[in-house]
Image (tube, grey):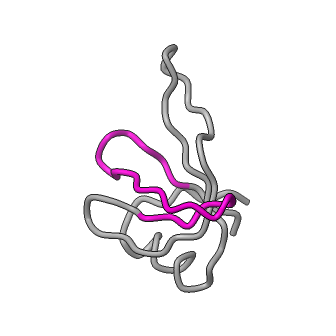
Amino acid sequence: MRKTLKSDGDLFTPALSQTTVSVWQTDANGLYCEVDRGIIEEFTRTSVRLSTISDEIAFYFRDDGTLFRAEM
């Protein structure tokens, strides 16, 4: 079951357990598409920092419509 991670509490569990999360953003047509996948390294009220599958660090803002999902 996929769970959309909205609150700090939702993000805390996958960050602590190092569960892979997917990042979804809208495309030009307004449809959500997966844009990245990785492990949450840090999160604040406004952003999430991921260590991505390709061993890069990525930052995403939580308040711009970006969705984070985890397999729970």
Residue in view at x 66 percent, y 67 percent: 20
Q: Residue furthest bottom?
A: 16
* Image location (x, y in percent) of residue 50: 51, 64
Quadrant (top left, top right, bottom left, bottom right) of the N terminus: bottom right
In depth, the one of 39 and 11 nearer the eye is 39
Quadrant (top left, top right, bottom left, bottom right) of the C terminus: bottom right
* Image location (x, y in percent) of residue 2: 68, 57
Residue in view at x 41 percent, y 76 percent: 9
Q: Is residue 9 left or right of residue 71?
A: left
- Can residue 67 be found in the magenta stretch? yes
Q: From which residue to which does the magenta span run?
A: 49-68
Q: Quadrant of residue 56?
A: bottom right
Q: Quadrant of residue 17?
A: bottom right
**How many numbered dots are placed on residues in this image?**
0
Residue in view at x 46 percent, y 78 percent: 12
Q: Is residue 47 left or right of residue 4?
A: left
* Image location (x, y in percent) of residue 6: 42, 59
In depth, the one of 72 and 63 nearer the eye is 63
Above or below, 53 against 41 in this view is above
Q: Is residue 65 left or right of residue 50?
A: left
Q: Residue furthest top?
A: 29
In depth, the one of 16 and 58 nearer the eye is 58
* Image location (x, y in percent) of residue 51: 56, 67
